[in-house]
Amino acid sequence: MIRTTIAIALLFPVLAHAVDLSGIPQNCKAPLAHDMEMANIPYLLELGENAARVTSIQTLGGTPAYEYYPGLYRIDCYITVHWSNGTVDYAHKFSMWQDKYGDLRGSYSQR
């Protein structure tokens, strides 16, 4: 699948109320990380209305959130995504980070 980056916070401002580390979940197994993956992967891939939907996500691993630059945080999660059309994305990487303006960014790609 295509690797794409967008501003997550612009699409889902509601999620900003239940976060740690200035918007980044503390670890990949946190419920917030799962919610952000479910909600944002279709947007990162720019899927249309009639496209397959994410049915489930299995967290395989990843690092806890870390400060990659003073005051800015990032998390990298390795996941397997199951789609409504039967497709499975095995061991893909979902990342979230703050840019230098404090906005949340994200990406989804093969390892």
Image (cartoon, rainbow, N blue to C red):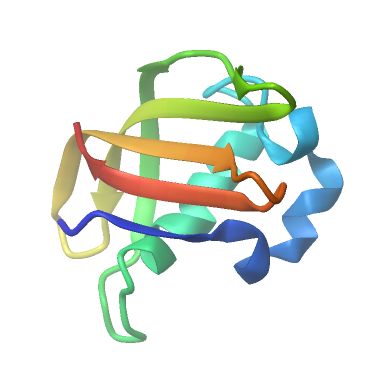
Camera-side residue of 59 and 65 = 65
The reply to whether residue 60 is in sight is: yes
Residue at the location (44% across, 37% down)?
95
Residue at the location (76% across, 28% down)?
21
Quarter of the figure with residue 53: bottom left
Number of numbered labels in the structure image: 0
Quarter of the figure with residue 49: bottom left
Is residue 52 shown left or right of residue 29?
left
In the current view of this chain or complex, which residue is farthest to the right? 17
Camera-side residue of 28 and 83 = 28
Where is residue 24 shown, x and y percent of the image? Answer: 66, 34
Is residue 85 shown left or right of residue 102?
left
The reply to whether residue 20 is in sight is: no
Is residue 40 shown left or right of residue 58?
right
In the current view of this chain or complex, which residue is farthest to the bottom? 49
Where is residue 98 shown, x and y percent of the image? Answer: 62, 41
Where is residue 82 shown, x and y percent of the image? Answer: 26, 47
Is residue 6 shown left or right of residue 65?
left
Residue at the location (86% across, 49% down)?
17
Where is residue 109 shown, x and y percent of the image? Answer: 24, 44
Q: Is residue 31 above or below residue 46?
A: above
Quadrant position of the C terminus in the picture:
top left
Q: Is residue 54 above or below residue 95?
A: below
Quadrant position of the N terminus in the picture:
bottom left
Q: Is residue 50 above or below residue 96?
A: below
Quarter of the figure with residue 52: bottom left
Residue at the location (62% across, 50% down)?
104
